[in-house]
Image: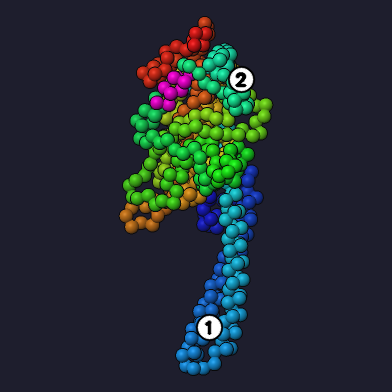
Amino acid sequence: MIDLKQIRRDPDAARAALARRGDDAALDRVLELDARRRELLPELEGLQATQNRASEAIAEAKRAGEDASEAIAQMREVSAKVKALKADVAKVEEELEAALASVPNLPADDAPDEDTVLREWGEAGREGRDHLDLLGELVDMERGARTSGSRFAYLRGPLVLLELALVRWGIDVLMEHGFEPVVPPVLVREEALFGTGFLPDTEQQIYRLADDDLYLAGTSEVPLASMHAGEILGPGTLPRRYAGFSSCFRREAGAAGKDTRGIFRVHQFDKLEMFAFVEPGASAAEHERILSIEEQILQALEIPYRVVNIAVGDLGASAAKKYDLEAWLPGQGRFRELTSCSNTTDYQARRLNIRYRPEEGARPEFAHTLNGTAIAVGRTIIAIVENHQREDGTIAVPEVLHDYGAPPVIDPRTA
């Protein structure tokens, strides 16, 4: 949620920033409702002051043994006006809250108007067989579909060892960078999804339990952000960095006919996610730090990639700036998104009421939050398999994973 005071101070700047996203229409409604609320509040406060004076006059008259009927009648009239005005204020405040919640984050000044490739690493351009052709029944789509429907799969044999090695190695990498490992809940309440900006925005992508007020999280960003909801973090306790590992669930509504082959776009997948709470002045540097960790991981896995600064028009509601790391996939002959990282500034913290004290006795301020994918397991397996395929149909597994239980070579013919 954006800062209402900031909008009041400079509505033209906020409008111009949101216009870059093509989403400035809701701002006029916010300003209109805010003006109406500020108009009603002094009127209400004035009537309440009159009500208090009338109450005192009635009490004084009764103590003096005088007739208070006229004052009581006036009191009733004022009370009725106060009640009606309170209802008006409550209605306006409810509409204002809803309107404010619908406004996306203001984009960073250096978020581009068009996707911009910042750099490339590794030798892209290689062609080859795709992961499904290479792995055969090690990715069992047929039985997955029979059990759960389309876009589900069984990973089998050495791919399971590869996944476990990826996650365990990735956790070690993140711990070296000061991230605390966390296994968060995968079922979350509506407040957690609202707080991270996924509601109201991506309802069509979220699984909801029919008999409970719970949702399946599409990313551990959601429960990680809510770890400190409603808290005031003490002086010197930021930054706080968490590495969340969980299964994730997405309906992929609207993706019919898109990426239906293999495990690139599925309803259930595992992911190792970075999440950071930092002071406002540190969030831009933290964003670059998270990006550098993502690059470190892909370089260690010897996966060619490029870094893309994402256009403001493609940012999610909560992001002020976002980078994508796109891996080269020989089986598709193009770059595809593998990981991403976003600076959400104070947008999520305001919705979740996460604050910190800069120093003892100081007034609490809203923290900044950032998220970034360390390892999207399914897509990383695709990138490893396709980029490390060999002429004989075997796959050379990156050396960094060998000590974590991954087989040095995957041979689908003998698995």
Whether residue 165 appears in magenta in the rendering, the answer is yes
Q: Is residue 3 visible?
A: yes
Q: How dense is the environment of label 2, judged by Cα within 10 Å: few (below 14), some, or many (20 and up)?
A: some
Q: Position of residue 44 (x, y in %)?
A: 56, 72
Is 123 located above or below residue 44 in the figure?
Answer: above
Q: Position of residue 206 (x, y in %)?
A: 58, 38
Residue 241 picture quarter: top left
Q: Position of residue 79 (x, y in %)?
A: 58, 77
Is 172 located above or below residue 234 in the figure?
Answer: above
Is 250 located above or below residue 282 in the figure?
Answer: above
Residue 398 in the figure: left or right of residue 328: left
**Magenta residues, dominant SS class:** helix
Q: Position of residue 166 (x, y in %)?
A: 43, 23
Give the amino acid at mark 2.
Glu
Q: Which residues are magenta?
A: 159-168
**Mark in front: 2 vs 1:** 2
Residue that appears at 56% across and 14% down:
136
Residue that appears at 45% across and 48% down:
229
Whether residue 91 appears in magenta in the rendering, the answer is no
Label 2 secondary element: helix
Label at residue 377? none
Q: Is residue 131 visible?
A: no
For disc 1, the marked residue is 54
